[in-house]
Amino acid sequence: MNGTVLEPSSHVVVVNRWREQYADFARYLDHSAHRVTYVSTEVGRASIPPTAAEVVVVEATDDLAEVRKAVAALAERHGAPDRIVALKEDDLLVGAALRAEWDVPGPREEQLLPFRDKFRMATEVAAAGVEVPDFAPAPDAASVLDFAGRAGWPVIVKPLIGSSSAGVVRVDGPQDLAGVSFRGEPRMVQAFDPHGIYHVDGSFDGSRVTVVRASRYLNNCLEFRGGGVLGSVEEDDPEVNGAVAGFALRVLRALTDRPTVFHLEVFFDPATRTCAFLEVGARVGGAEIPLLWREVHGRDLMETAFRNQLGLPVLEEPRQPGTGETGGWLLVPAPESRPCRITAVTPMAGPLPGQPYAEALLTPGEVLPEADSYYEHVGGRFRFRGASSAAVEEAIRRTAASFEVSAEPVAPARAGSKVVQHEAVRAAAPELAFDTVVFSDPAALERYLAGQAGTTQVLRPEFTANTGSALFARPGRPVPPEELAGLWRDGGRVLVHAFVPGTPYFANGVVVDGELRLTDTWRCYSLEEGPRWLLTAVVNALPGSAEVRLLEQALQALVTGSGVRSGPVCFEAVLSGSDVKVVKYARRIAGEPLPRLCSLLGIDGQSGDAAQAPDGFVADYAFTVRRDGTLTGFSGLDEVRQLTSYSGDLFMPAPGDTVARTVGEGGGAAVLLRHADQAVLLADLRYLQERNRAGVFVVAD
């Protein structure tokens, strides 16, 4: 594809994690003329245009494996990507790796590493004759001591790759080294420069800086990490701006000959009007910088970055006239460790001189999330403009002194919380939710079960990925104490609800323009083992069958109620007559073995956008191990392998192997069943259930 032309109906994948609309994606690219899809965190969904062709939610956009899988799924449904955009600093290398894998235009890893690896960038900038404070690798404390012996104390120790000053430590002397960790990612040490820090933002066309502005930090990013406010005011002194702009040009020419936006930080000596290099990123500055540039100066640096990654020419002129004023911004840190719930906040914005012209505050009751976009999710964000640097600085300091915000801690939401899932289902579609009772105290749970001794109750731990984690307390058959204690092993709470008789199903699909389309549905089979029902098999249900229609109709209410417009979804549900209850609900692609079973059936599953007629029927069957020990042989395995639908072993231990009692999904061995006739496969499955009850494994101590 031509790197300077975006063909009509191109598939553009955008990787995003921002809740704030730092980037106006809908304006940058016509979403009706192109297939624009997004890979986003849950928090980032708020800034994605409603006209997006699809959104796939991931836990972390800097997890290359997870984003790679999401992009592959989008490619199945929308075609191979023609461009891939990732604007956040921590996502730059993910975007570069994916561009290389899909062979699309845009920056590659080797072009971006000089802007991400701080040791490499300092080395290359210094080699070009640019002033850089002395630096060296810091693999351990001894190397820091050796360096400080030459350069003096204090020194700065920091990770080679990072953002928002994460992991940066000032070390004032040998006594401080005990608190510095050298584990994990590589680090470097650098001489401390006492001068004030400026950030310099703009655009470089490969040979010249086309637009640039210098701003003076009123403190610094490291102090913000430590709990102080962070403020910045644009410089209105022409001599300072000229010196900083010239220095920026030298730095950029040392690192690249390609177009890039940049966020440069320098030490500035006011006595000599000279700069020394701190670091630079090939991205738009964080905090309020992109918004300030749009609102005060009429220029959208995010659009420039977006067009650079698409390989399109940069717009030379501003989108709109600027105000001609000087800008500034202020961040006030979160009043509690995130996540936290705001309890009180003082609005500060207004039209009067000295007031911020814009602010971003949470209202009391809202939760400040524990999200990765560090400078976005803070206690308060403010933007200023005025006639001079002095006027803006005074307004910033006055706001910092007057603003008040308070919050209370909120327990972090661990991934996969069944409590959160059940609450989400109840909020979106109450008729699909179980009537659950949640316990955080083992004694309270035991008292409750004693009062429900005449009914069957289902007990689920809040956190576990294991399908077989639920326990059943039946009349006259209470859960053994050791099993009850195991519910609390992974932390969290315990959910309890009355047993609802019915048939369990896994139902997977995609949402297209708000419409749920189940692509693959699986009936679940299980065996009772003590206080558990252990999953032994899943068998595909035919598209259009009565049970699939019932599930699709009922689950549509959950999709609609939770506001999902596009992307993959998966459910675990119980079908009881015409009623449906939801056990689990997630906005993601189902895990193995279901995608693999789909491929055996010759269907796309969630890689497609609708159900397809399968090539027959398939099931995986897992055998239960009933005691720990050494496997000495099998009982009935030869007969199993003679079944009409038997299609091979999925996994099988060998005599002499150590085996463990089955307490969850998966079993100790599994076989694959496959046949064109559903009746034949189901008859074999019934035989396997009886064989499994009788026991397949011969185990010795």
Image (cartoon, helix red, strand yellow):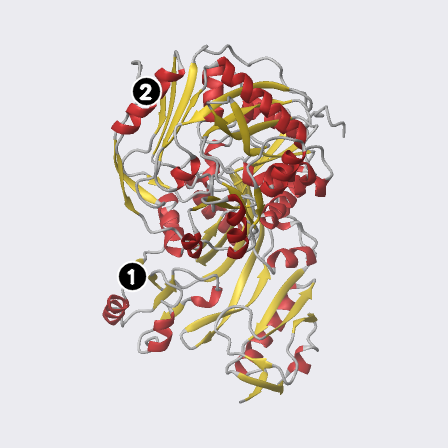
Tell me the distance, in whole angstroms, between the alpha carbons under discs 1 and 2. Answer: 52 Å
User: Which residue is drawn at the image coordinates 53% and 27% (left, top)?
Assistant: 275
Quick one: 361 or 225, which is closer to the camera? 225
- Numbered badge on residue 394: 2
Amino acid type, mark 1: Phe
> What residue is shown at x 69% (from left), y 40% (from top)?
110
Residue 162 seen in the figure? yes
- The image quadrant that residue 6 belongs to is top right
Q: Which residue is mark 1?
A: 439
Across and down, in percent, residue 97 comes to: 67, 43
Q: Is residue 200 above or below residue 701?
A: above
Q: Quadrant of residue 108?
A: top right
Query: Closer to the camera, 267 or 7?
Result: 267
Q: Which numbered disc flags the more N-terminal residue, 1 or 2?
A: 2
Image coordinates of residue 174 in percent, x first then y, are 44, 53
Which residue is farthest right?
Answer: 1
Q: Decide which of 347, 619 is in the foreground and name it.
A: 347
